[in-house]
Amino acid sequence: MKTARRFGHPIARTDSSQGWPQPGILECDLGSPRKVAHVVLEEEIAKGQHVLSGALDAMAGAAWKTVAEGQSIGRKRIERFQPPITAQKIRLRVLQADAIPAISAMTVHPEY
């Protein structure tokens, strides 16, 4: 039940199914500054695991700030922010990939 409460109602969601608006960058606009506790990233594994490294950035005010960096995404990668961060936008930057990745979901979750 905790998982459904924590991840059941994202405050923003996007994916790369319509292509990449900017090469290697996916962005979620939260509408207004919100407390963010988790960002869940998922690659469409049926199309292969292609992300080798990436970063998550948060925009609070007028500037982007890197809040997490990591290696592969794979089927699912959950970034937890403890304490939660405040952001109006969250973006994924793919820093290195061995092919164009298919991100099936990037969801942003509030504190629960």
Image (cartoon, helix red, strand yellow):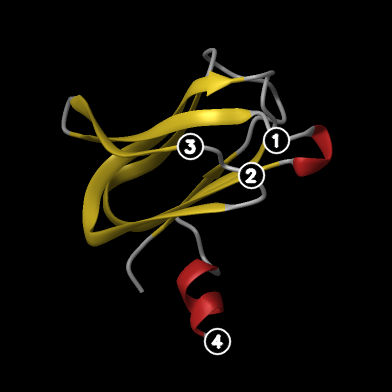
Secondary structure beneath label 2: loop
The crowd level at tag 1 (other Cα within 10 Å; few <14, some 14-19, many 20+) is many
Q: Secondary structure at mark 3?
A: loop
Residue plotted at (64% across, 44% down): 74
- Cβ atoms under marks 1 and 4 closer than 8 Å: no
Residue that numbered label 3 is attached to: 71
In the picture, the disc for residue 1 is: 4
Residue at the extreme right: 46
Residue 51 in the image: x percent, y percent? 59, 30
Quarter residue 111 falls in? bottom left
Answer few, some or many: residues within 10 Å of disc 2's Cα (few below 14, many 20 plus, some between 14 and 19). Answer: some
Q: CA distance from mark 2 to mark 3?
A: 9 Å
Q: Nearer the viewer, residue 38 or 14?
A: 38
Assign a secondary structure to mark 4: loop
Q: Tell me which amino acid carries mark 3.
A: Gln
Q: What's the CA distance linking mark 3 and mark 1?
A: 11 Å
For marks 2 and 4, give the CA distance: 25 Å
**Mark 2 / mark 4, whichever is N-terminal:** 4
Dot 3: within a 10 Å radius of its alpha carbon, few (fewer than 14), some, or many (20 or more) residues? Answer: some
Mark linked to residue 74: 2
Q: Earlier in the sequence, mark 3 or mark 1?
A: 1
Residue 26 point in image, percent of width and height: 51, 28
Determine which residue is flagged by label 1. Answer: 49
